[in-house]
Image: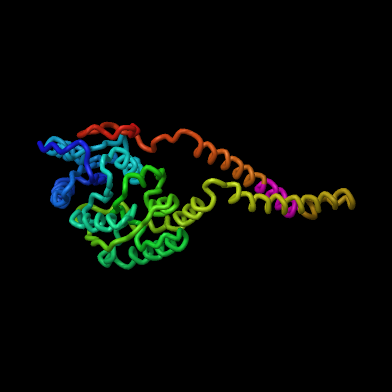
Amino acid sequence: MENPEHACRYSVVVRMFNEAPYVRRLYEQLVAAMQKLPEPFELVFVDDGSADSTFALLSELVQRDARVRVVRLRRNFGQTAALAAGFDHALGDIIIAMDADLRSSPAEIPLLLDKLAEGYDLVSGWRQDRRHEGFLRTWPSRVANWLLAKISGVELRDFGTTFKAYRRELLRDLRLYGDRHRFIPVLASWVGARIAEVAVSDAPREFGHSHYGIGRTRRVFFDLLSLKFLMDYTSRPLHFFGPAGLLGLGAGSAILLFLFIKKVAYGTHLFVEHGPLVILGMLLFLSGLQLLAVGLIGELVARTHFDGHEKPVYRVDCVLGQTRMAGAPH
């Protein structure tokens, strides 16, 4: 068994979910690419609740090569949580993340590292040629990337790729949960990171099917909405819900006041003559109250989030290989 130094310069983090056909080829290509670098490295594979033989194959790699570490999660937590687990357990000063399906080539890792050496904190791959995916997948992706760039102010052409290189100190400042892995460049820009992009290849998936089908494009609108909310209202949700709440509360109050005056002054039978208006006034008033309440509760939740103890978004079943990074959560 090869025994590298405990400290390493580079960590390659790969999320694995039912990727048994790729395990050995991925390992071989990663080792071939990383061995060309002059400094020590490690490979951190995160098994995100695979139901096939992925974990067994990864366990064999741990026995063969001390540079391999396997973090097995207790269930399938999703890509963001799996990447967070890999980042937490990585020992390298520079961390490279990629998918397991070999659509991104490990041989192109030096492209990211060379750009990172120019003084950047994050370098993202840009899948320049994706014609093999077909128009129905590439066109919505291009539109979404363009909108994300315009909304966020981060001038990237490909937000969706996992193939990125990071400096460790940058990842320490990022809190990943939900589907935030798609917004890592945006989150990084908030903390003042220097971000760059390099063109990389994108090969068709050889085995099985992609875990991200065309149905994912339906989530673009919600991605954009959540990004806008995260950028402008994360720390002040009342500013988001408050105006709509005040508008509903004001309109409802005006309608109900008008009806009250008619009832008192003219004895009008409200439900007979103004039934729909009564219902509209009550709905607007109650909706306004609810939106204001949601905003206030959001303020309390935000305060708790920023002031309270942050818990990990994943649970580890076991770790095979080198000792995990001190302070990494279980």
Quadrant in the rendering for residue 169: top left
Residues shaded magenta: 275-288
Q: For this rendering, which residue is in front, 286 or 230?
A: 230
Q: Residue at x 40, y 44 (%)?
A: 173
Is 8 on the left or on the right of 74, as rendered? left
Magenta segment: does it hold 24?
Answer: no
Q: Residue at x 47, y 60 (%)?
A: 151
Q: Residue at x 23, y 58 (%)?
A: 111
Q: For this rendering, which residue is in front, 285 or 309?
A: 309
Quadrant the C terminus occupies: top left
Q: Residue at x 22, y 60 (%)?
A: 203
Quadrant in the rendering for residue 186: bottom left
Quadrant in the rendering for residue 195: bottom left
Quadrant the N terminus occupies: top left
Q: Main secondary structure of the magenta part?
A: helix
Provide residue 264's location: percent of width, then percent of height: 88, 48
